[in-house]
Amino acid sequence: MRIYRFDEIDSTNKFLREKKDVMEKDLAIAKIQTLGRGRRGNKWVSTEGAALFSFVLKHDLEIPEEEYMKLPLLVGYSLLYSLKKIEDLDYRFKWTNDLFLDEKKISGILVEKIGDNYIIGIGLNVNNLNLEEAKNIAISLREKTGKIYDLEKLILTVVEDFYCNFKEFKDGNWKEILEKINRVNYLYGKRIEVVTFDRKESGIAGDILSDGTLEVFVGDEIKKYNIGSIHIAKK
Ligand code: BTN
């Protein structure tokens, strides 16, 4: 594993996206990001003390392309159970890409594909207390436990666990993995609003299904969603 450490960089995802000789398991870690990016072009607040890192997964030709739709779920699952080993708290996985703790976001995941490589970017609030504009909706491990964590050790655990879990996935253990994901499904039973390209629908979220989609009970219909952005409806 090649590790690239930065005191400050625009974005670790961007660094790996633009790197010429990028290899599987390349890992970029930043103390601060000046242009941390989230999904749908959102900004990711990247203050010191957060774990800000990205790593590379090569597209494996033995795995059908559509299986990679599940990658964000697999990353979220892997991250959640790695965190549980470090601090056994009641984390929840919010389909498709976030981890929550006490109804606040503790981590966001951004998976991007560049050529034959997936760049997996994780922002995880660990030792940071100053969550700036995100403070009402975000939480860090330190805020919850009062402890300070060794960031690099935590990051290495997360990354190594991910490659092990990816191997399990490749070996055909998706059913077991999915069961464990559904045990920590943040959206389950919540009224949510699903926003797709041209529509907004309100319904009650159910399980994450075997193909990685989310089932939603809209009126007396059961719908499956795999695109669009999802919001929890205000009460
Ligand atoms: C989201 O919640 O929308 C995803 C946030 C992902 C943030 C991480 S921080 C490390 C990596 N570099 C980036 O610019 N983004 C990801």
Image: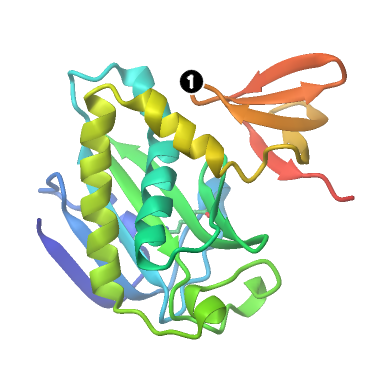
| Residue occupying image coordinates x 16% and y 53% | 26
Q: Is mark 1 within 8 Å of ligand 1?
A: no
Above or below — where is 169 with respect to 73? Answer: above
Q: Secondary structure at mark 1?
A: loop
Image quadrant in which you'd find residue 54:
bottom left
Q: Quadrant of residue 177?
A: top left
Residue 116 seen in this snapshot: no
* Amino acid identity at mark 1: Ser
**Who is closer to the viewer here, 136 or 83?**
83
* Label 1 Cα neighbours within 10 Å, binned few <14 / some 14-19 / many ≥20: few
Compared to residue 115, the image places residue 98 above or below, namely below
Please state which of residues 58 and 214 is positioned toward the viewer in this rendering.
214
Q: Position of residue 176 (x, y in %)?
A: 39, 29
Q: Position of residue 105 (x, y in %)?
A: 59, 61
Q: In this rendering, would 164 be left or right of 180?
A: left
Above or below 77: residue 218: above
Q: State the residue position of label 1.
A: 210
Residue drawn at the location 42% of the way across and 27% of the way down: 69
Q: Residue at x 32, y 62 (%)?
A: 53
- How is the protein colored in the picture? rainbow
Where is residue 223? Give x, y as percent: 71, 18
Most foreground residue, 183 or 104: 183
Which image quarter holds the N terminus? bottom left
**Which quarter holds ligand 1?**
bottom left
Q: Which residue is depicted at the point 38% across and 38% down?
A: 74
Pick the front one: 7 or 163: 163
Question: Residue 10 at what x, y percent from top left?
Answer: 37, 68
